[in-house]
């Protein structure tokens, strides 16, 4: 039997995707000893809309990593085009707070950038680690993790705080039995693929009763094109389903797609109801999809994941550095997350259920926009955290 590896840290983060890597980066920049573990490999792809909204771009700018996203060839998106009820509405990105464009990096680009920044700040990142158990104390608190590496070697890692950033099917959430405090009532299924040489009009969103489609410019001269509908309509997905729904929702985009290069395969996501889980307890916390997941049709998952990474990092620093009461600051973390999330969560749940008409969708989109503005205002007002104070803020 291989000997067990044992290590001790201030914080152990389970999950090295955007939410986990960003949290680890901010904690390490604040002087904490941080271990990040992930069962996948560095730079692995994952389901994503890729679209970053203004709040996420603002944070990447303030964290000093937006230049890396741009240097990776991520195209600048300077407007969003909405089509609904026979109308075309174009919203231009107004420069403010260091943000003059939006971006939609592939996850094979964004996640490694955040992981590299975390490592540069002093965090340790280990891939190929599967977490099998949470270690506890005699008072019911979490004090670490137990797992195995890709070779089967057992390990234990202790931490003042264990953070689950391991996605919507979070192992950490399951092990602490984190209850779902708000559950969505609808789910949409999605078929999507990547096309080269597609002419796009910024971010494109096409809303028609019973289906939605869109195009999102990303890295490598490609665009992510998607269709979203009820699971019954999407069925098993595939190129034919995507083409049929695209033609019904946007003949214009369908024609441009036909003139573009061939897709590199069409993928399908069968959908999952949204959730807001209790996201803290003695010695543990959740961030990203582990704590808060909503239908990908919102294209806001990454933006909220980065938002919550900063909110949780601030709480963790208060506990580990300032000696603040863990229950108070972690409860405040979830309270702030929920306050910023409820309105958007409920609107997206209605849109994802395709329970709206041509007359209703403009009002829903306006409400969605207002919720996003509130989020950006909160982020812009936050003071610098840790070493990120030296990187400047808008």
Image: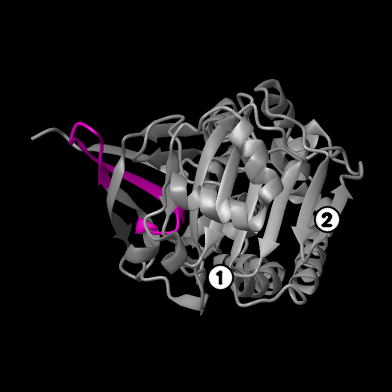
Depicted 332 relative to depicted 384: above or below: below
Tell me if 54 is positioned left or right of 207 in this view.
Answer: right
Of the pair 366 and 31, the residue shown nearer to us: 366
- The N terminus: image quadrant: top left
Per the image, the residue denoted by label 1 is 327
Depicted 271 relative to depicted 254: above or below: below
Depicted 154 relative to depicted 184: above or below: above
Is 159 inside the magenta-drawn segment?
yes
Identify the residue at image location x=34%, y=38%: 7
Please give the count of numbered marks on the rendered protein: 2
Identify the residue at image location x=53%, y=53%: 244
First to last magenta residue range: 147-171
Of the pair 53 and 167, the residue shown nearer to us: 53
| Whole-percent x, y for residue 333 in the image | 63, 65
How far is disc 2 from disc 1 in space, using C-alphas?
48 Å
- In the rendered structure, which disc, 2 or 1, sits on the residue that comes first in sequence? 2
Colour convention of the picture: one colour
Per the image, the residue denoted by label 2 is 88
Depicted 239 relative to depicted 187: above or below: above
| Whole-percent x, y for residue 266 in the image | 45, 42
Q: Is residue 156 visible in the rendered structure shown here?
A: yes
Res. 47 mark: none
Q: Is residue 315 visible in the rendered structure shown here?
A: no
Of the pair 115 and 353, the residue shown nearer to us: 353
Task: Say which element carries label 2.
Answer: strand
Q: Residues within 10 Å of mark 2 (few under 14, many from 20)?
A: few
Is 202 inside the magenta-drawn segment?
no
């Amino acid at each position: 039997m291989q000997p067990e590896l044992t290590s001790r840290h201030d914080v152990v983060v389970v999950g090295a995707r955007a939410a986990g890597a960003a949290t680890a980066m901010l904690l390490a920049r604040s002087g904490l000893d941080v271990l990040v573990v992930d069962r996948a490999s560095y730079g692995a792809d994952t389901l994503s809309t890729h679209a970053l909204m203004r709040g996420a771009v603002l944070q990447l700018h303030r964290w000093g990593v937006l230049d890396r996203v741009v240097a990776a060839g991520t195209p600048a998106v300077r407007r969003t085009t909405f089509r609904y009820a026979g109308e075309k509405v174009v919203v231009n990105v107004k420069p403010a707070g260091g943000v003059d464009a939006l971006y939609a990096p592939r996850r094979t680009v964004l996640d490694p950038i955040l992981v590299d920044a975390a490592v540069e700040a002093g965090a340790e990142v280990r891939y190929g680690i599967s977490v099998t158990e949470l270690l506890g104390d005699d008072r019911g608190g979490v004090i670490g993790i137990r797992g195995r590496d890709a070779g089967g070697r057992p390990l234990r890692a202790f931490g003042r705080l264990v953070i689950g950033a391991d996605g919507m099917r979070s192992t950490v959430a399951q092990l602490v039995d984190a209850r779902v405090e708000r559950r969505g009532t609808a789910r949409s299924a999605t078929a999507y693929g990547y096309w080269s040489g597609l002419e796009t009009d910024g971010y494109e969103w096409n809303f028609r009763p019973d289906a939605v489609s869109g195009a999102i410019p990303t890295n490598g001269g490609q665009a992510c094109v998607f269709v979203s509908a009820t699971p019954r309509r999407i069925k098993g997905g595939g190129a034919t389903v995507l083409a049929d729904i695209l033609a019904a929702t946007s003949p214009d985009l369908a024609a441009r797609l036909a003139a573009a290069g061939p897709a590199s395969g069409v993928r399908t996501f069968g959908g999952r109801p949204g959730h807001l889980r209790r996201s803290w307890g003695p010695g543990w916390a959740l961030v990203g999809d582990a704590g808060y997941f909503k239908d990908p049709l919102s294209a806001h998952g990454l933006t909220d994941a980065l938002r919550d990474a900063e909110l949780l990092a601030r709480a963790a620093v208060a506990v580990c550095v300032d000696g603040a009461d863990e229950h108070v600051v972690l409860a405040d973390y979830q309270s702030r997350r929920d306050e910023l999330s409820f309105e958007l969560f409920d609107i997206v749940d209605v849109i994802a259920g395709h329970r709206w008409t041509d007359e209703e969708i403009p009002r829903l989109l306006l409400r969605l926009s207002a919720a996003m503005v509130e989020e950006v205002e909160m982020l812009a007002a936050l003071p610098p955290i840790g070493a990120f104070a030296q990187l400047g803020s808008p």
